[in-house]
């Protein structure tokens, strides 16, 4: 079975729609989301509703937990705090209630799913081979998928070796049949790896193969929505640069 893995949508309806359209051209049987449907972007209700309609599994990210009140906003940057407060004010209550039911991890599948990491499902950014090594030490699945960092990455530890990792670009494919793996599909709505296109990962559970994909979307439309909502302009500007 093929699975589409998405993460970090962040209220960017334009990017999410483009990714869903791309997923529809593949043989993906299910869509699994690693969280952060909201925060930063200007269309949180639309993104939650798209997730409700299209995903089989959806985790809670730290921004989702902030909007529901499960996390204190004191732990967020100023821009993220402003966006979270605005999101709380504008979202439909039934969509917030749906977010409240989500958890930041799912370990009941053939692969482990975490918003951030196996060591800390809410906050840890896995951006180095050292952190990946520590996560591989504690994860209970041979293959785990994480989001949160907004960077498309793969880390592997083969028998008798230390973990190594590298960024993943559009079109990269990996044979995951051997070794222990930690994979990040990248961000749908706010990539931070200098590629502004929306990112996602196609995972074949039978063949144990992963393929990273990138999708162009209406960046100007997403930026206009952020500015119309009077959110910090930096949240709009960064979308052009993938940072």
Image (cartoon, rainbow, N blue to C red):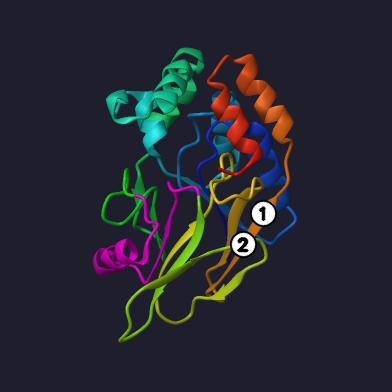
The residue wearing badge 1 is 214
Q: Is 135 covered by the magenta stretch?
A: yes
Q: Earlier in the sequence, mark 1 or mark 2?
A: 2
Callout 1 crowding tier (Cα within 10 Å): few <14, some 14–19, many ≥20: many
Q: Is 198 covered by the magenta stretch?
A: no
Quadrant showing the C terminus: top right
Q: Are marks 1 and 2 in contact (CB under 8 Å)?
A: yes
Residue 183 against residue 84 in the figure, above or below: below
Whether residue 49 can be seen here: no
Q: Residue at x 36, y 50 (%)?
A: 125
The residue wearing badge 2 is 169
Which residues fall within the magenta stretch?
Answer: 125-150
How many labels sit on residues? Answer: 2
Callout 2 crowding tier (Cα within 10 Å): few <14, some 14–19, many ≥20: some
Q: Position of residue 38 (x, y in %)?
A: 49, 31
Quarter residue 82 falls in: top left
Foreground residue, 56 or 230? 230
């Amino acid at each position: 079975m093929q699975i589409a893995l998405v993460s970090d949508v962040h209220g960017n309806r334009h990017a999410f729609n483009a990714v869903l359209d791309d997923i529809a051209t593949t043989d993906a049987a299910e869509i699994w989301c690693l969280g952060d449907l909201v925060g930063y972007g200007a269309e949180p209700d639309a993104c939650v509703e798209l997730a409700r309609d299209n995903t089989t599994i959806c985790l809670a990210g730290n921004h989702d937990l902030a909007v529901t009140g499960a996390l204190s906003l004191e732990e967020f940057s100023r821009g993220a705090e402003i966006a979270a407060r605005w999101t709380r004010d504008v979202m439909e209550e039934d969509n917030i209630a749906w977010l409240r039911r989500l958890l930041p991890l799912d370990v009941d599948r053939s692969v482990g799913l975490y918003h951030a990491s196996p060591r800390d499902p809410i906050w840890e950014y896995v951006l180095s081979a050292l952190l990946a090594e520590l996560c591989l030490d504690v994860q209970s699945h041979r293959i785990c998928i994480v989001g949160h960092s907004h960077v498309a990455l793969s880390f592997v530890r083969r028998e008798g070796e230390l973990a190594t990792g590298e960024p993943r670009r559009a079109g990269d494919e990996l044979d995951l049949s051997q070794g222990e793996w930690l994979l990040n599909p990248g961000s749908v709505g706010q990539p931070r790896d200098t590629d502004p296109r929306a990112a996602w990962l196609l995972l074949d559970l039978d063949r144990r193969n992963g393929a990273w994909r990138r999708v162009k979307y209406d960046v100007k439309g997403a930026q206009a929505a952020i500015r119309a909502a009077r959110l910090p302009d930096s949240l709009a500007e960064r979308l052009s640069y993938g940072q």
